[in-house]
Image: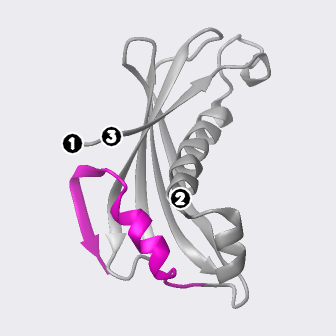
């Protein structure tokens, strides 16, 4: 299976008073990976503005497995788990791996594309569909309604 990854450096500002990464930063790391992929595949902010469409999140869940500490090397993966037939709704999964590939967290994100003028969920333009087809898929990937 192909894989898309983003490398993250832990910054001092990412730490909480217990000297491990603050829980909300895990979500930021997933968002960074998603946006890196989309931007690299033509879904840029100017494209979103041009088409009056942007991503929204319905649910974001993180299962924390291991602490991430200052100095850890973080690899964030991206996979598509579910996609509506018209590309308007999707579920993405991120694994946050530390150092030698140890699973630190699993993030699941349910989202959609929203027409920013109508303020409603809407199918994206064809260029967005092409990018979504390039996202690596989970073993359980399915297309739905």
Return the disc, 1 or 2, that comes first in the chain's sequence. Answer: 1
Q: CA distance from mark 1 to mark 2?
A: 26 Å
**Which residue was labeled with disc 2?**
59
**Which residue was labeled with disc 3?**
3
Q: Nearer the viewer, residue 74 or 61?
A: 74
Q: CA distance from mark 3 to mark 1?
A: 6 Å
Q: Nearer the viewer, residue 4 or 56?
A: 4
Q: Quadrant of the C terminus?
A: bottom left
Return the disc, 3 or 2, that comes first in the chain's sequence. Answer: 3
Task: Assess whether mark 1 and mark 3 are in contact (beta carbons under 8 angstroms).
Answer: yes
Of tags 1 and 2, which is closer to the observer? 1
Can you tell which quarter of the image residue 55 is in? bottom right
| Residue 28 higher or lower than 34, as above or below | above
- Give the residues in magenta: 121-145
Q: Nearer the viewer, residue 66 or 124?
A: 124
**Which residue was labeled with disc 1?**
1
CA neighbours of label 2 inside 10 A, class few (<14), some (14 to 19), many (20+): few
Is residue 128 inside the magenta stretch? yes
């Amino acid at each position: 299976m192909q894989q898309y990854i983003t490398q993250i450096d832990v910054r001092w500002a990412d730490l909480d008073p217990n000297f491990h990464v603050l829980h909300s930063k895990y979500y930021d790391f997933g968002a960074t990976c998603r946006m890196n992929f989309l931007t690299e595949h033509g879904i840029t902010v100017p494209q979103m503005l041009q088409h009056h469409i942007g991503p929204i999140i319905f649910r974001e869940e993180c299962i924390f497995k291991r602490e991430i500490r200052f100095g850890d090397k973080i690899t964030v993966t991206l996979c598509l788990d579910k996609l509506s037939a018209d590309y308007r709704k999707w579920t993405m999964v991120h694994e946050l791996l530390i150092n030698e590939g140890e699973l630190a967290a699993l993030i699941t994100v349910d989202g959609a594309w929203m027409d920013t003028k109508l303020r409603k969920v809407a199918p994206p333009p064809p260029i967005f569909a092409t990018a979504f087809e390039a996202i690596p898929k989970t073993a359980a990937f399915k297309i739905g309604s």
